[in-house]
Amino acid sequence: MTSVFYPQAADGFGKGFLFMRRIEVKTGKPYEILVERSISGRVGAELLKVASVKRVMVVTDKTVEGLYFERVKNSLIASGIEVCEFVIAPGERSKSTENLVRLWEALAESEITRSDAIIALGGGVVGDLAGFAASTFLRGIKYVQIPTTLLAMTDSSVGGKTAVDLKAGKNLAGAFHQPCLVLCDPETLGTLPREHMRDGMAEVIKYGMINRPEIIDKLYAYTPGDKDALDEIISMCIEDKRDVVSGDEFDTGIRALLNFGHTPAHAIELGSNYEITHGSAVAIGMVIMTRASVKMGLCKENALDKLLGLLDKFGLPSSCSYSAKTLAQGALGDKKRTGDTISVIMEYGIGDARICKVKVSELEKIFEKGLEK
């Protein structure tokens, strides 16, 4: 990672100096993640540094379109790049096979070629759908991630996981396809609804719980509205995911740690027909797995106390109305399941999560411990 410092911008953001974080992800196809305020207004110039592109399809949702599409489009046009657009409704239900087919058809009708690119402008739903389309259209074309939510910046835009949902569960049809560039503009978080910001904080807390305890300390000290501190926290999360992904690009080992809390979370989302958001579900899932770890003697009570304290600080839920049996049944379609075993992430202490393989038949008992008060 490198940091480029330059004098404070005229808009007054920052304290004395601003900096751009340039984080390299060393996967089969290496790429960079740039973290800088207002970088979404330089998309065209940054894209041409990594690829000779003449035409792009910008995939976004209706909400983000009204906020940032014109800025991105004008930047691309100024760089001589032709712009096409594909807009979906906001929300998890848009990450569907129906929209995937619609996007494929739009790409074909727009005559997007292998020398062109897709740009994902939005949150995790947009990024997953656009990335999966990029991985499959013409057997694979380039794509750029421009995440506009905290959750997407710190998690889903990094690492090349792309997917759509099926009726049986979340992210069951997908592919690994690394972006050629990720541009994180924390300024876009200024228009993010409070509940979406809370969702992103769940994933940020996750990094601290699995292997970066200093993130937990920074979150306890964080004052909402401190842009410099937020930019630093975002960069720390990206660096952590970069390190994990670089060592396990195709999710066959240590990368499973990033699913801490996600096995019950995906069951919660599915059971609620996605009325419960991903971040809220992850928050509840982390509590379930941490409390289960405490009751199984794997870690001390203070790990759960610290987690609950942060969830309370950021307004995230910690309790679940579903039974252990319902959660266990919902987890049967989890991607981490192999035959009659499933990988779950247990907490051994703040910053020390570990992958444990358990029998599917034991999952309900683990969830029961996690739901006990």
Image (spheres, rainbow, N blue to C red):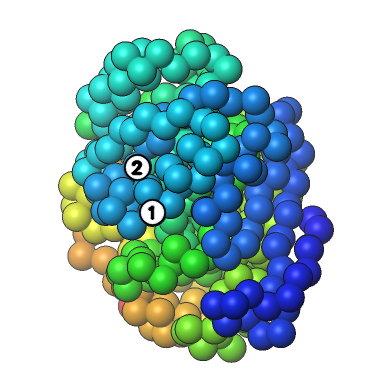
Residue at 27% x, 38% y: name it: 87
Work out whether 23 lies above or below 83. below
Quadrant of the rendering where the C terminus is positioned:
bottom left
Give the mark nearer the N terminus: 2 vs 1: 2
Q: Which mark is residue 60?
A: 2
Number of the front mark, 2 or 1: 1
- Residue 328 spot, x, y in % from top left: 32, 47
Q: Which mark is residue 68?
A: 1
The amino acid type found where label 2 is placed reads Thr
Is residue 15 something that shows in the picture?
A: yes
- Residue 37 spot, x, y in % from top left: 57, 65
Residue at 49% x, 67% y: name it: 187
- Count of residue discs: 2
Label 1 CA crowd tier, 10 Å (few <14, some 14–19, many 20+):
some
Label 2 CA crowd tier, 10 Å (few <14, some 14–19, many 20+):
many
Work out whether 262 lies above or below 207. above
Quadrant of the rendering where the N terminus is positioned:
bottom right
Instruction: Name the secondary structure under disc 1.
Output: helix
Per the model, the C-alpha gap separating discs 2 and 1 is: 9 Å
Q: Is residue 80 left or right of residue 354?
A: left
- Residue 312 spot, x, y in % from top left: 39, 83
Residue at 49% x, 77% y: name it: 307
Indicate the quadrant where residue 104 lies: top left
Q: Is residue 49 left or right of residue 63?
A: right
Is residue 367 something that shows in the picture?
A: no
Work out whether 200 lies above or below 271. below
Depth check, front residue: 250 or 127 = 127
The amino acid type found where label 1 is placed reads Tyr
User: Are the residues flagged by discs 2 and 1 in contact, CB closer than 8 Å?
Assistant: yes
Depth check, front residue: 137 or 247 = 137
